[in-house]
Amino acid sequence: MLRAFGLAVSRLTCHFSHMRHPSTFDPDIRRVAHQLADAARQVILPYFRDMSLGAENKLEDSFDPVTIADRAAEEAMRAILAHARPDDAILGEEFGAKDGTSGLTWVLDPIDGTRGFISGTPTWGVLIAVSDRQGPFYGIIDQPYIGERFEGAPDGAVLAGPQGVRALGTRKARPLQEATVLTTFPEVGEPGEGRAFHDVAGRTRLTRYGMDCYGYALLAAGQVDLVIEAGLAPYDIQAPIAVVQAAGGVVTDWQGGPAHNGGRALAAANPDLHAEALAVLQRHT
């Protein structure tokens, strides 16, 4: 799979020239990232749709599940990084932060969308990002059950899946009233955040729920126009940022600033639609 990604990326040109390029992009990052994604797939898939799989609740006042698959996948990815990239820092959902000395951080969410995972829906994914002080510049959204891997890097964005390998590109500009918007939870976040989202959604043609990280993958693939969420952690959003931006999209918080530290996120297929949706959100914030 890594070779196929490399061949596709080599054919991409100036379409991605708007992206932030680190002074050097270490090809070892791509190699190791695909190793992590492959390892996570191998660990997770035997648990998916296993009727005997249990889930623990990480919260007292609501439901935030974690399973053995979440923890085992992150352990497998951390073991690879300990050997292959020992100087890099790590931030993972299940096992927290590990300091590094290289200036780079691997941001890991072994199963983004555990609620979907335990419900048997194939909208969850493995998230892998690499960040520097400016934020994420490389990311993978991997859906093991479908067999789709979305990669965003300084040299472009590609999808490898059942239909082969192809370049990713977001949709061209269209009016907000013709757009499709995705989010995960109907309530979105706090009540005020929910009102802001539904103000935008009410102006669009179609709203869909329950997407988790797969919504950002669909945005990068040119299938939808907007993803709007709140209450995110850094490991929820950093890989999606890298993939969407590499495909030509825009990702910010609801004030138009960086979103990589989590919180609220507005991802749009293009700058025009981003500006239109942002103007509506800002009326509520």
Image (cartoon, rainbow, N blue to C red):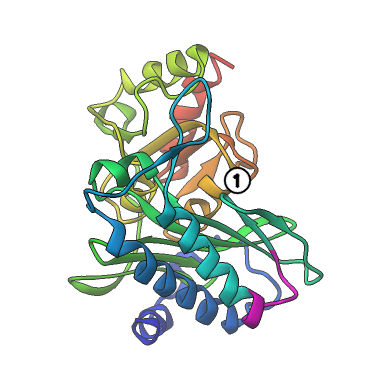
The residue located at (51%, 23%) in the rendering is 279
- Which quarter of the rendering shows the C terminus? top right
Can the viewer see residue 28? yes
| Magenta residues (range) | 82-89
**Residue 127 locus on image (x, y percent):** 47, 57
User: Which quadrant holds the N terminus?
Assistant: bottom left
In terms of image quadrants, where is residue 202?
A: top left
113 and 280: which is toward the camera: 113
Question: Is 266 inside the magenta-drawn segment?
Answer: no
Residue 191 image position (x, y, % from top left): 48, 12
Q: Residue at x 44, y 17 (%)?
A: 194
Residue 138's place in the image compared with 177, above or below, is below
Q: Quadrant of residue 27?
A: bottom right
> In the image, what residue occupies the spot 48% across and 22% down?
189
Coordinates of residue 192 in the picture (x, y in percent): 51, 12
- State the residue in front, 175 or 266: 266
| Mark 1 crowdedness (10 Å alpha carbons): few <14, some 14-19, many ≥20 | some
211, above or below 194, in the image: below
174 vs 23, left or right, is left
- Kindly tell me whether residue 144 is visible in this rendering: no
**Left or right, 218 with reference to 107:** left
Label 1 sits on a secondary structure element that is: helix
Marker count (numbered): 1
Residue at horizontal 49 percent and vertical 33 percent from the top: 275
Q: Position of residue 73 (x, y in %)?
A: 46, 63
Q: Outermost residue toward the front? A: 52
> Of residues 93 and 209, which is closer to you in this image?
93
Q: Is residue 29 above or below residue 72?
A: below
Residue under numbered circle 1: 234
